[in-house]
Amino acid sequence: MLAGAVAQRPHVGGHTWVFLQYLLGLQALGWDVMLVDSLAADQAESADYLVGVMERFRLADAYAVLIDGSEETIGRSRRDAVEHARSSAALINVMGYLKDDEVLAAAPMRVFLDIDPGFGQMWRALGLADPFAEHDAFVTVGENLGLEGCTIPTCGLDWIATPQPVVLDEWPVAGGVGDTFTSVGAWRGPYGPIDYGGRTYGLRVHEFRRFLELPRRTGRSFEVALDIHAAEEADLARLREDGWRLADPRAVAGTPEAYREYIAGSLGELMVAKNMYVASRSGWFSDRSICYLASGRPVLAQDTGIRGRYPHGDGLLVFSDLDEAREGVEAIAGDPDRHRRAAREIAEAHFASDIVLPRLLDELGIG
């Protein structure tokens, strides 16, 4: 069983793919999978998005949306959800989203899957919140957590590190070569900065501002499907002045299919990470970037502590400052075919779901 917020975040295609990679990847390995989500009674119409996605991806009988304070559900019944949890090898609770006591209690193993490393751990260390309570195992995509140089506290928990998986059959190599570096993301996101250990750990905005000059410095085309509030007037003006094209993320990446198509039309990705991931040396690598690689689209990724963890130089290039970013842009634009081939090879060797998921299950003790 996989638990998380898909219905609550409709028309965010990249977020939806995080869950589809696990559901489709586990299904391909022979597992009977179910997604459990929840909504407040006055949000029930938001489930229409999830229902459509699950039908299109051959998962029409593999979800239950619990309606808070009610026995009502959308999709499978509450009883089905409880029984699936009870008979499951594990309930994987993404960011501890599921709070339903009955479903959680039925599962023989409750796994916390941390896809936003640093925030939850620092909240717990500061006594602000404990998202990890009532879980039996702990998995993070911050692959440096617990290693020397990473400043994210372990909170005394034994963390299993894993990259995000990608289902390669769903991400074929895209034909042609685009002429624009692209990405998709939020300027700020749902969390604020955190003061921990004498420093402030911030958001993507705090890193992106360091690289605003990149289009002007390189003369290349850049576009970002950016979730940014209209009130961010100074940043919006600066983005446009420095040559960034801004796309509406809901328009170009509002469904899993549109998101996949947007990535396929790119020359490559410029991946600027949250300051939390960079400053903590977390070893985080974007699920979005993995989709670019699988599509045969090279990734120019800001270093979060990944340098040396994965092959880089062809297909995946890593930068820490504006000069390195500029050099990476020119390298990709100068030989796109070589970088396209290398990108797919990296995805196949390191991020394919039929490699990542069996290894994760083994580490959880689930053969």
Image: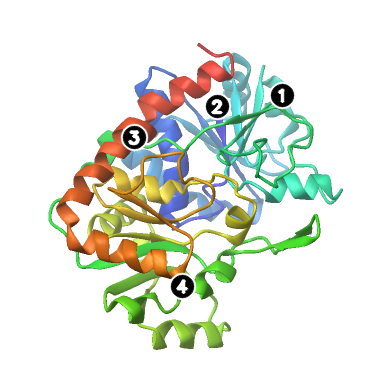
Q: What's the distance in space between the residues labelled 1 and 3, CA to CA? A: 27 Å
Give the mark toward the camera: 4 or 2.
Answer: 4
| CA separation in Å, label 4 and label 3 | 31 Å
Q: CA distance from mark 2 to mark 1?
A: 15 Å
Expressed as whole percent of the image width and height from the top left, the position of residue 91 reads 60, 26
Residue at 35 percent across and 46 percent down: it is 291
Name the residue nearer the viewer: 108 or 262: 262
> Label 1: few (<14), some or many (≥20) within 10 Å?
few
170 or 188: nearer the eye?
Answer: 188
Quadrant of the rendered image containing residue 332? bottom left
Which residue carries the number 3 mark? Answer: 167
Q: Which residue is mark 1?
A: 136
Mark 4 vs 3, N-terminal side:
3
Relative to 36, does residue 185 appear above or below in the rendering?
below
CB atoms of marks 2 and 3 within 8 Å: no
Q: Quadrant of residue 328?
A: bottom left
CB contact under 8 Å: marks 2 and 1: no
The amino acid type of the residue labelled 4 equals Phe
* Structural distance between the alpha carbons of marks 2 and 3: 18 Å
Q: What's the image's color scheme?
A: rainbow
The residue at the point 57 percent across, 60 percent down is 274
Marks 1 and 4, how far apart in space?
A: 41 Å
Q: Secondary structure at mark 2?
A: loop
**How far apart in space, not on screen, are marks 4 and 2 (Cα)?**
40 Å
Residue tagged 4: 211
Question: How many dots with numbers?
Answer: 4
Task: Please name the amino acid that badge 2 sits on.
Answer: Met
Specify whether 113 is left or right of 309.
Answer: right
- Give the mark, 2 or 3, whose residue is nearer the N terminus: 2
